[in-house]
Image (cartoon, grey):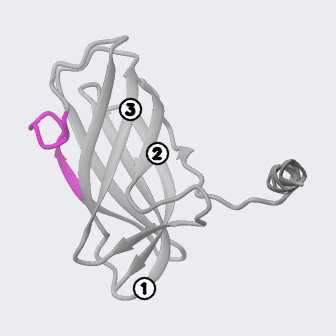
């Protein structure tokens, strides 16, 4: 009986329409993301909740495809029918993001940081872009994910 229930649940989860947060590559040119984890963002969520005034931890692992003497972290919120709001641009090699420059081609890195919600006037669903721009001005990594800002 227990085996039948486990098998049934397994089949239901395998063939049901499961909704989950989708992380989309938005133009990673000089690197490849191998994993991304956003605090309080589960595989069964439609979006990642971001609370105004609180931070959400992000952990991104990637492999560099080029050497780079510097790296710039850029966070952008894309609001439907309004457009993009770039709300953070910082030196990725400052120590705040767990990165050490120079970045070397072929090496794996882990970028960790605390992200604030974008400054929006009300609760809303939007997309967040997380970019790491290399010394050539190209996206080493770029990941986009849906978020819901909660006031």
Tell me what residue is drawn at x 35 percent, y 15 percent: 66
User: Mark 2 — residue?
Assistant: 143
Rate crowding at label 2 as few (under 14), some (14 to 19) or many (20 or more) other CA atoms within 10 Å. Answer: many
- In percent of width and height, residue 75 lies at 31, 54
The quadrant of the image that shows the C terminus is: bottom left
The range drawn in magenta is 88-98
Mark found first going from the N terminus, 2 or 3: 3
* Front position in the image: 111 or 101: 111
Q: Quadrant of residue 102?
A: top left
Nearer the camera: disc 2 or disc 3: 3
- Indicate whether 75 appears above or below 122: above
Tell me what residue is drawn at x 46 percent, y 45 percent: 143
Mark found first going from the N terminus, 1 or 3: 3
Mark found first going from the N terminus, 1 or 2: 1
User: Mark 1 — residue?
Assistant: 123
Magenta segment main secondary structure: loop
- In percent of width and height, residue 56 lies at 31, 61
Is 89 included in the stretch rendered in magenta? Answer: yes
* Front position in the image: 21 or 66: 21
> Taking 92 as reference, is 2 left or right?
right
- In percent of width and height, residue 52 lies at 28, 78
User: Mark 3 — residue?
Assistant: 61
C-alpha span from label 2 to label 3: 12 Å
- Indicate whether 68 appears above or below 44: above
C-alpha span from label 1 to label 2: 22 Å
Is 43 included in the stretch rendered in magenta? Answer: no
């Amino acid at each position: 009986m227990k085996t039948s229930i486990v098998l049934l649940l397994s089949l239901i989860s395998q063939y049901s329409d499961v909704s989950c947060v989708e992380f989309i590559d938005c133009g990673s040119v000089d690197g490849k993301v191998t994993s991304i984890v956003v605090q309080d963002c589960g595989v069964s969520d439609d979006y990642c909740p971001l609370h105004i005034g609180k931070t959400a931890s992000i952990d991104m692992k990637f492999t560099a495809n080029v050497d780079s003497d510097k790296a710039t972290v850029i966070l952008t919120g894309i609001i439907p029918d309004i457009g993009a709001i770039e709300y953070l641009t910082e030196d990725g090699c400052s120590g705040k993001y767990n990165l050490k420059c120079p970045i070397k081609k072929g090496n794996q890195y882990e970028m960790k940081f605390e992200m604030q919600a974008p400054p929006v006037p009300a609760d809303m669903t939007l997309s967040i872009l997380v970019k790491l721009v290399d010394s050539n001005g190209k996206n080493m990594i770029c990941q986009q994910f849906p978020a819901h800002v909660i006031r």
